[in-house]
Amino acid sequence: MNKLILGRYFPGNSFLHRIDPRAKLLAALYFIGLLFFVDYFVGFIWMICFTLLVTKISGVSLSIYLKGIKPLIWLILMSVFFRVIFTVGGTIYFSKGPFAISSYGLLLGFFSFNRFILIIIISTALTLTTKPIDLTDAIDALLKPLRLLGISTAEFSLMLSISLRFIPNLLDETQKVLDAQRARGVVFGEGNLLEQMKKIVPLIIPLFSSSLKRAEEMADVLEVRGYQPSKKRSSFRQLSWRFHDTASLLIMGVLTIGVIILNQFPIIEQWLL
Amino acid sequence: MKQHPILSIKDVSYRYDLRHEDYALSQISLDVKRGEWLTVLGENGSGKSTLARLIVGLAEPEFGTITFNDQTVTQANKSTFWEKVGIVFQNPDNQFIGTTVQDDVAFSLENLNLSYHEMKQRVTNALHQVGMYKLREKDPSQLSGGQKQRVAIAGVLALEPELMIFDEAFIMLDPQSRTRLLKELKLIQKNLGLTIISITHDHNETVFADRLLLLASGQIIDQGDPRTVFTRNRYVQPPFAEQFRRELVQRGISVPDNYMSNDELVEWLCK
Ligand SMILES: Nc1ncnc2c1ncn2[C@@H]1O[C@H](COP(=O)(O)OP(=O)(O)OP(=O)(O)O)[C@@H](O)[C@H]1O
Ligand SMILES: [Mg+2]
């Protein structure tokens, strides 16, 4: 469970840490969208360079990012593989029935491989440098326009922040129940699948009942502390937008201009096809 | 003119399971005067927490009525009282709603839609009062049980309600901090005319009480000022000073024959 890097926060004080979460979230989403408008090889090089720059200013070493990719690598390689064998174009190196390995297929495979990796690295950079609660606030802020449509986003944000708040508790409780079962002589991670499943059941039930009880008590507390879903409430957590936040969004503009220009130059493509 | 009680409970009965005859509370009647400190003493399962839940409207009495500021507490209007009543529950874990200490203390204030400036001031004050200001950025998983209890207490202090209810809210605090906090509360209570209902097992906490209520199996056994109650109910363990006096009496030493508070004992010993 500790291996998952995506979605984790690394406390720090890098430039990226200090950018307003709203700016970071917007920029990350924009970057991911922009990736799908990159047409040619040189454009991808441009995006890769930018991503490397981001990892650099995040103050987290590149190896951590690579570790974040690792659990997903087989999934990525598999989809890239299908992309390659189902695309035909340019020089054909090998073909059998509907499958072929062609220069164009390899190029598209490389493009989608890049997209996957860059999306993971950028989202990792976002979560590594932003506290979950700040991210929740950012999501809340970005969803605000929905309120004009009468969709209440405040409850969603509160739900999200309470869930975040209780994840450690749940992990704690799991550990406690595990320990309690171990103390009674249950050995986990042994026996065949059926036996292992049987051992999980006594774990799930106490966890489920304690979560229900917790939820009930929480609901009472929300109530007596004056929380009413429909009522307007102020926020103690204040986000402050500063100049470098605007600047980081302007950088997205520069990135876009770069992509537009490089989309005119299919240099590698002309040479390959 | 006789002052109206801030809280008035009349013939209240309540049971969790309507299919069974065992009442968690039966025929409870009680008035709480504005500005008084009422301590509720009772064994496990005597109905103390149930009483607290009824007062804040989390449960509705089967019989009888509860009035707060001359208004009957009902399921329809209970939300209008929550600004004026602050409660700290027994379990400090599940009442921590914010992701950090200061967020949690601010939660009730956010619900009142206060300005950031006002919140900041109240949160800072309350955190200083419970000695948690330094830990304001911590999240609940980094806190001990007693620290979480302090945060919950700070949440109520920041709300500045008319009535505060503490359901065994001090038990996890170390004795020193507990005494300090209780003394401070006593001061705040006197200065602001605050009303406090404190539910406890701690017999030494009764020294802060203006009035004592004994609860057993969902019924009120006795109520009155601590002196009277402890004198009338010899089997209830009194605060340390009185225990000490009784011990001296048993040893045949001539001591005044009635209940003594801490101060009275000290004075008598010095003579
Ligand atoms: N959720 C519940 N469902 C059913 N019965 C309950 C529930 N909560 C409490 N009771 C019962 O009501 C009675 C009073 O419980 P209450 O929690 O008020 O006691 P208490 O005086 O607060 O005890 P403690 O000192 O342990 O906190 C007990 O007999 C208990 O079994
Ligand atoms: Mg209780």
Image (cartoon, coloured by chain):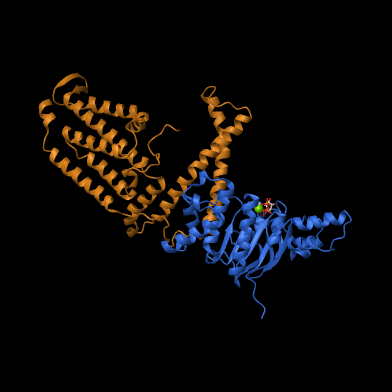
Chain colours: A orange, B blue
Residue A210 lies left or right of residue B261; in this view the side is: left
Which quadrant of the rendered structure holds the C terminus of chain A?
top left
Q: Position of residue A172 (x, y in %)?
A: 53, 39
Q: Is residue B4 above or below residue A200?
A: below
In this rendered view, identify the residue nearer to me: B175 or A126. B175
Q: Quadrant of residue B8?
A: bottom right
Q: Is residue A35 above or below residue A94?
A: below
Q: Quadrant of the N terminus of chain A?
A: top left
Residue B252 in sight from this viewpoint: yes
Name the residue: 66% across, 81% down. B1
Horizontal and vertical percent position of residue B64: 67, 66
Decide if residue B221 is in sight here. Answer: no
Q: Is residue A70 left or right of residue A159?
A: left
Quarter assignment of residue B203: bottom right
x and y percentages locating residue A41 in the rendered image: 17, 32
Among the 4 quarters of the image, the one containing residue B250: bottom right
User: Farthest residue in the bottom direction?
Assistant: B1
Q: Nearer the viewer, residue B77 or B271?
A: B271
Which residue is pictured at 61% across the width and 73% down the height? B70
Residue furthest to the front in view is: B271
The relative height of residue A113 versus residue B171 in the rendered view (above or below) is above
Q: Nearer the viewer, residue B142 or A116?
A: B142
Give the number of callouts.
0
Q: Is residue A187 left or right of residue A152?
A: right
The picture places residue A144, in percent across and down from the top left corner, at 34, 56
Which one is in front, B102 or A167? B102
